[in-house]
Image (cartoon, helix red, strand yellow):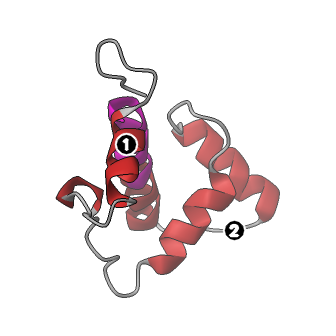
Amino acid sequence: MRRPAGSQQTVRQQLEAVAKTGFRPPELDTPPMPAGMEYLWQLYFQIKRGIEPLTYQELSSWCALTGQMLDPPEVEAIMKIDSIVTRSMHND
């Protein structure tokens, strides 16, 4: 997580502290989840372990262990979610 030079807090922690004063910085706002995509978000958190980027091998292993079958577009959506989450964790 990114910390400004000389700071002990991440950028997100600083923004959340500002939000507690009654002003919500726009950087904390996130777009709404597209309708019908909530299940992919839930699956992502069942699959994801740790902070390293998710690999196709890990996703394949999870499918084999759980018996969950994913269509190729679902696989790509989960990998895209992971890319966004991983990038945001490294930018905070």
- The one nearer the camera, 7 or 76, is 7
Above or below, comparing residue 91 to residue 37 in the picture: above
- The one nearer the camera, 4 or 2, is 4
Residue type marked 1: Arg
Q: CA distance from mark 2 to mark 1?
A: 35 Å
Above or below, comparing residue 89 to residue 25 in the picture: above
Q: Which mark is residue 71?
A: none
| Mark 2 surroundings within 10 Å by alpha-carbon count, few (fewer than 14), some (14 through 19), many (20 or more) | few
- SS at mark 2 in the image: loop
Above or below, comparing residue 90 to residue 45 in the picture: above
* Numbered range of the magenta stretch: 81-92
- SS at mark 1 in the image: helix
Q: Position of residue 83 (x, y in %)?
A: 37, 43
Which residue is label 1 attached to?
Answer: 12
What residue is shown at x 25% (from left), y 70% (from top)?
A: 31
Residue type marked 2: Gln
Which residue is label 2 attached to?
Answer: 68
